[in-house]
Image (cartoon, grey):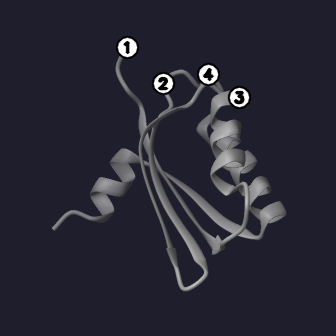
């Protein structure tokens, strides 16, 4: 099966449960985490994830909405970008 890669970025004040809640939501929606990087910078949590959405059978906008709703509840900014959009925006 061909991978359908997207980038998820998360930024906000550090708090317990960020990785657990986001990864749990992705697991529930059959989205696989391919790579993850996270860091705490002066009290702010910053995370970038590369995910494979090929197992997600709903419109991608729906997952973005669920992540945005979770971000609002946790006072985080969560964004999703398809790999092709990300690559075209960052082409040199």
Q: Position of residue 73 (x, y in %)?
A: 84, 61
Judge left or right: residue 5 versus residue 24: left
Mark drawn on residue 28: 3
**Disc 4 from disc 3: Cα separation:** 12 Å
- In this picture, is 33 found above or below 56? below
Residue behind mark 4: 57
| Cβ atoms under marks 2 and 3 closer than 8 Å | no
Judge left or right: residue 90 versus residue 52: left
- In this picture, is 27 found above or below 21? above
Q: At 60% from the left edge and 38% from the top edge, which residue is drawn?
A: 60
Please report whichever mark, 2 or 3, sits nearer to the chain's N-terminal start: 3
Q: Which mark is in front, 3 or 1? A: 3
Q: Secondary structure at mark 2?
A: loop
Q: Secondary structure at mark 4?
A: loop
Q: At 77% from the left edge and 70% from the top edge, which residue is drawn?
A: 75
- In this picture, is 34 found above or below 8? above
């Amino acid at each position: 099966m061909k991978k359908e890669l997207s980038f998820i970025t998360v930024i906000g004040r550090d708090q317990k449960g960020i990785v657990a809640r986001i990864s749990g939501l992705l697991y529930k929606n059959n989205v696989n985490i391919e790579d993850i990087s996270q860091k705490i910078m002066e009290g702010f949590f910053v995370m970038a994830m590369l995910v494979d959405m090929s197992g997600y059978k709903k419109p991608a906008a729906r997952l973005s909405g669920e992540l945005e709703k979770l971000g609002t509840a946790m006072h985080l900014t969560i964004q999703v970008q398809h790999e092709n959009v990300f690559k075209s925006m960052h082409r040199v």
